[in-house]
Image (cartoon, helix red, strand yellow):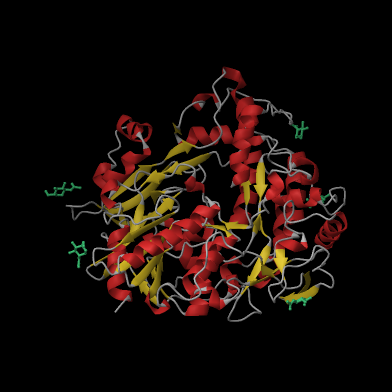
Amino acid sequence: MHALAASVAALALVTAPTLAVPAATKADPCAKFAGQAFVVPADALACLKSFPFNETLRQNVLSNIAGVFDFFTFEDFYLNSPPPFQESTTNIRADIARINRTHFETDFDFNKAVYDFTTQLNDGHTRWFPSCYTSFQNLLPAPMATLEENGVQNVFVVPDLLDFVPLVGTGFTDHFAQIGFNWQRLVGAKVLEIEGKDPYAYADLIASTQSGNYLDHGVRVNSVFSSYRISGTDFSQRFGDIAGPQFPNQDTLTVKLITVNSTRPETVEIPYLANYVGAPFTDQASLSVNLHWEANCAANDATNGQDLRTVLNNAKRATPKRARASIIDASQKNAVGLPGPFVPTAPPVDGSTGVIKSFILPDNKTGVMFVGSFEGDFNQFQADTVAAMQDFKTSGVSRLLIDLTNNGGGFVCLGQFLHQFLAGSQIGYPGFQSTSRANPLAQKILAADIALGNNNQITFYSPDNWAFLNDTQMPLTNNYNNPDVVLRTNGVADPTSQRFHDVCTPFSVPIPTTPQFNLKNVAIVSNGNCASTCAMFSTLMFERHQTKTAIFGGKPGEQVQYKGMAGNQVLEWVDLDDEIKTAGVKSDPLAPPDLLVNANMRHNWRTAWSFLNERVPIAYESELPQFRFPYTKDTYNNPQALWTFAASKLFD
Ligand SMILES: *[C@@H]1O[C@H](CO)[C@@H](O)[C@H](O)[C@H]1NC(C)=O
Ligand SMILES: *[C@@H]1O[C@H](CO)[C@@H](O)[C@H](O)[C@H]1NC(C)=O
Ligand SMILES: *[C@@H]1O[C@H](CO)[C@@H](O)[C@H](O)[C@H]1NC(C)=O
Ligand SMILES: *[C@@H]1O[C@H](CO)[C@@H](O)[C@H](O)[C@H]1NC(C)=O
Ligand SMILES: *[C@@H]1O[C@H](CO)[C@@H](O)[C@H](O)[C@H]1NC(C)=O
């Protein structure tokens, strides 16, 4: 994420036409929308498809991603993914070879093939994001939700449509007024078919082909529907992947439905409108294809890594690098607020200005912490936790509900912090055993870091990032890849690092020795879209303390795991390249080449091993929640109503 933000900032400063710009053939298809926030999908797609296929770029991209996959800890699991995660089974090297021999007309078609292949790995940590082609998000003025009514679940157009859609902006609603499409009459409509399929079958299809991010299919089904969340530090409502797909490659969605107040089924072609979320560029007539390419497609100063031995000054080196584990959700770029009527009305307690929003429910007994992510200000997260907990205690709150809905993860150590703060320092090490792959290049990086004396201020490979299993920090000379440990997965023997612990302590606030709340009176709610650090936190609470967990939503009759993507630390391409260059091994033939295009091949760099079964990565440990509830029209977009319902079910 920081790489993407940095690349936008860098553009303002740098004019770097590092790449020959493909010549515009006919009339310039990008000129049409320069400077506009909304554009009809066909026009957006014409712009994206205006760049011809280029074999040099294909070889550059495929060489880069093939090299990155050498570091991907779960590669061998994909050969035969264990149940219930079989859907993700694929041979990654064969997929790369297939894309290498496929005929593509345009650079977009090639990039979309790579995007789809990595998305369908269903690991939000391991994906290809070409900035050139992720510069739009299609939006449908009819987001959908699965809701129970009178004991039966169905798919509906969201009942808060009239409050929600206008929040996208007048650029969006004016378009539909102009073309005479009355989306307002679809509010709360019962959906009978989508694209000629049963709506849940269509939800399954989108979950299988477009949602990605989570190994568990059931969790992905919840991604296709609209749901509440915290985006940044604000309450937000997510469109869901049916109404908010990544690419502007669909003009309309054909939906058979019954509107409120009617009993007559009708079929409606609902038009999409594409929202431009790429880097801004202004229309300069025939120059705009070039400007679109320069703004979004060509590699810039932030695309590839640097030798941090020479780049970072002493001030920057004062703090260690911080491990992060998170997904990238395209819908964060143009996040829409949660309509006012559904924002919690209970007064917020102290420590609620950041990513955590805490409340005391009107029963005066239940404290709620809505942990929107583990991102943001590292120290403020800890201070906010202390402040909320103190406020709960002085208010006489006796039970704690933690909402992890749509929490996309963040700093690895903040997940361990929250676990230890709740359970007390008496539990000892609050994280998981971890490993990275010890492939030949990884061995060279670590050996070089040790020889150069590189430390945790400039690299993640340096031994002082980690602790032995007795929680003593490794000395700078400890080569944890020597000897390596052979891991056998699906018949493949893979050299792996020795096991180690994270070094997260001391935290910036004091940790109580014993739990603040009896852990029997702590419960978790979410929609399963709880990724990365969030998945590690919820797994720790479940595996070590049997914390009650309730999952809402999903397809009736289909399982939903309580955690989404539970890898461990993620390296963006720029991070991995920093490691390679800072260790001085970029000239090694095994090192992936710098990207010629502005893109990111991120990967899951470390495995977290299950506490219950230290032979299984927690990502592949099937763990179902103890409680499962359908959403209703009162709870799907209304956090406080959901918490009140959950408190009545989960606490005595
Ligand atoms: C393909 O891309 C390479 C690398 O940017 C560039 O040098 C070359 O001119 C491009 N080829 C064509 C035919 O545009
Ligand atoms: C793609 O295939 C060509 C022809 O077989 C081969 O030379 C090249 O190395 C392959 N590229 C990658 C990245 O595997
Ligand atoms: C349905 O009927 C009620 C009562 O007449 C009315 O208030 C409401 O606006 C109608 N809803 C729609 C979507 O037409
Ligand atoms: C909760 O506390 C408030 C403020 O002290 C009080 O007005 C209210 O009646 C209490 N509610 C319950 C259910 O006890
Ligand atoms: C912890 O383990 C390491 C590696 O086995 C060992 O060298 C070190 O002495 C141990 N430290 C303590 C305090 O036991």
Q: Position of residue 93 (x, y in %)?
A: 74, 60
Query: Which quadrant of the rendered structure holds the C terminus?
Result: bottom left
Q: Is residue 432 visible?
A: yes
Q: Position of residue 296 (x, y in %)?
A: 61, 35
Q: Is residue 203 visible?
A: no
Residue at (25, 71) in percent of width and height: 151
> In the displayed image of the protein, which residue is found farthest to the bottom?
613
The answer to whether 186 is drawn above or below residue 619 in the figure is above
Quarter of the view holding residue 279: top right
Is residue 547 found left or right of 123 in the rendered image? left
Q: Nearer the viewer, residue 305 or 422?
A: 422
The answer to whether 79 is drawn above or below residue 132 in the figure is below
Q: Position of residue 193 (x, y in %)?
A: 35, 57
Q: Nearer the viewer, residue 41 or 301?
A: 301
Q: Position of residue 189 (x, y in %)?
A: 26, 53
Is residue 168 found left or right of 323 in the rendered image? left
Q: Nearer the viewer, residue 652 or 334?
A: 652
- The quarter of the image that holds ligand 1 is top right
Residue at (86, 57) in percent of width and height: 448
Residue at (28, 50) in percent of width and height: 160
Is residue 585 found left or right of 2 in the rendered image? right
Total labels: the figure holds 0
The answer to whether 140 is drawn above or below residue 602 in the figure is above
